[in-house]
Amino acid sequence: METIPKFHEETIQSSHLSLEKLLGAGSEYAFRKIIRLFQDPLRKFVIGQTGIIEEVDDIVHDSFLLLWTNYVLKGKTIYNARALLFQIAHHSCINHIRRERIAQIFRCKGSDAEPVATPCERLDEKEKNSIALQIFFRLPRKDREILTLYYIEQIP
């Protein structure tokens, strides 16, 4: 097994130290134990909150990842790991539902609207238009008139 900061595995198993204290110390062992204990209940909770089975594992994984990065790695005090984890999962479900609603709105509007160009695409378009205008104004007058009639006034 890996070495656990400030504690040995035997000490963890034989003592009455809570998982919250071990998580506060940055223990990967305690974090893995939290994952094993709460993964299935958290999956059921997320399914109940969202009703979406396909993305449950992603939301649960993100919840554990947020617990690790925002609390354990930063050394924040965790008083109740279960409550905190379910609170993180609840907020992750809310964020997921909001993103889905926004995506659905844009899919509905996007069916009859043109796709929005990225800043890079807009810059490329401007450069192409600038080059085309420079070439256009270098043409003889009669050729410019022909192109104007063909492309702008749609006269063949």
Image (tube, rainbow, N blue to C red):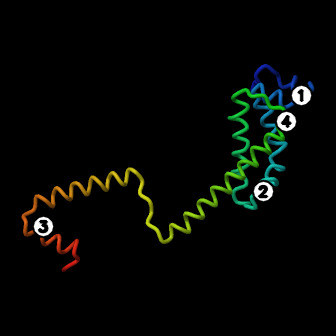
Dot 1 amino acid type:
Gln
Disc 1 versus disc 2: nearer the observer: 2
Q: Which residue is mark 2?
A: 49
Pointer 4: residues within 10 angstroms few (<14), some, or many (20+)? few
Dot 3 amino acid type:
Arg
Disc 1 versus disc 3: nearer the observer: 3
Where is residue 24 drawn, in percent x and y?
Answer: 78, 27
Asked whether the beta carbons under mark 4 and mark 1 sit within 8 Å of each other, the answer is: no
Which residue occupies the foreground of this view, 114 or 8? 114
Of helix, strand and loop, which one carries label 1?
A: helix
Q: Which residue is mark 4?
A: 80
Asked whether the beta carbons under mark 2 and mark 3 sit within 8 Å of each other, the answer is: no
Of helix, strand and loop, which one carries label 2?
A: helix
Compare marks 3 and 4 and give the one earlier in the sequence.
Answer: 4
Give the image quarter of residue 73.
top right
Calculate the distance from the C-alpha at mark 3 to the C-alpha at mark 4. Answer: 76 Å
Where is residue 79 drawn, in percent x and y?
Answer: 84, 32
Compare marks 1 and 2 and give the one earlier in the sequence.
Answer: 1
Where is residue 67 drawn, in percent x and y?
Answer: 73, 38
